[in-house]
Image (spheres, helix red, strand yellow):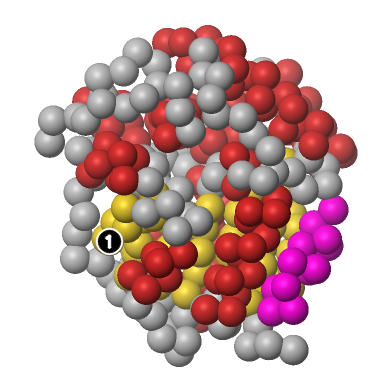
Amino acid sequence: MKNQPALDTHSIQSTMLLPLWGRAAASEKNPDILYDRQAIEIIKNCDYDFDSIAKVFGEFSGICYVVRARQIDDAIRAYMQTHPRAVIVNIGAGLDTTFSRVDNGLIRWYNLDLPDAIAYRQSFIPDSERSQSIAKSFFDTTWFEDVHFTPEEGIMFVAGGVFYYFREEELREVVAAMARRFPGGELYFDAESKQAVDKSNRMVQKTGNQRAPMYFYVNDAAALNRWAPEISVVSCLDYFAGIPRSRQWSWRSRLMARASAWMGLMKFIHLRFSHGR
């Protein structure tokens, strides 16, 4: 393992430690949802005190992180059923470990993130022949040229816990450009309502990180159809759809999972890029 480069703990990049903690902590208690062996190993070797994260976020947040990983895994596996040689682009990859769980031996994978985040990632998860890093901002669309794909093989973009940190107008511009550049592609990401984003902001600030505010929220997924003529909403599902509820969860966690569906607090959105209308 390489020496770990410094990571600014008051930055958007540092938020990669939150889902890492969540997947490691919650997957050990909820292996029927997902077991993230690689995240558990990284936690053991990471020079960071995760106690403050655990105290602020608690059980339900950990469950949310492991559920997010499971839903993204399932979406990718479903796509691979018809596109076994697909290209997968993991936007804002951070310390994500999805490739280790879904790799079918044929897909090609790209991890896109800022240069310091990629450097930190590679100290734990080095690139391999079919899993490559792109050290660029999502908004620096020269990364389009680094992604090699054919429409026949297919391409899917995933973004777990990423889009919250950007403004809608910024996202709309880049996603519309993606739709034009990667016709036939698909995008799968999680989003929260305005109410949930406000609460998430308060929780992140409690960890001492004051420089990673969240902006983007989705109250009505149908509005995303207006981002560009080439973009259409395939589905918008409740965050916990299809996820087994454990009796070991506290009553508070079970109640909050139900509230997500009742109030539309958290969801997964699936977009498809057409060949034009």
User: Which residue is at a point 19% across and 29% down the rendered structure image?
Assistant: 4
* Residue placed furthest toward the left: 2
In this picture, residue 272 sits left or right of residue 183: right
Looking at the rendered image, the quarter that the N terminus falls into is: top left
Crowd class of label 1 (few under 14; some 14 to 19; many from 20; radius 10 Å): some
User: Which of 248 and 208 lies nearest the eye of the viewer?
Assistant: 208
- Residue designated by label 1: 131
Place of residue 55 in the rendered image (x, y in percent of width and height, measured from the top left): 53, 10
Q: Quadrant of residue 59?
A: top right
Indicate whether residue 53 is drawn in magenta: no
For the C terminus, give its image quadrant.
Answer: bottom right
* Callout 1: SS: strand
Name the residue: 19% across, 65% down.
129
Residue 165 versus residue 192: which sits nearer the camera?
Answer: 165
Q: Residue at x 50, y 56 (%)?
A: 139
The residue sitting at 43% across, 52% down in the picture is 137
Magenta range is 220-231
Does residue 25 appear in this view?
Answer: no
Coordinates of residue 235 in the picture (x, y in percent): 74, 64
Q: Is residue 187 above or below residue 7?
A: below
Of the pair 51 and 35, the residue shown nearer to us: 51
Is residue 136 found left or right of 164 in the rendered image? left
Residue 33 in the image: x percent, y percent? 53, 42
Image quadrant assignment for residue 226: bottom right
Determine which quarter of the picture holds residue 244: top right
Q: Is residue 197 visible?
A: yes
Residue 86 picture location, percent across and down: 41, 76
> Which three-letter amino acid code belongs to the residue tagged 1?
Ser
Locate residue 127 relative to residue 270 in the image: left or right: left
Give the side of residue 80 with respect to residue 68, left or right.
left
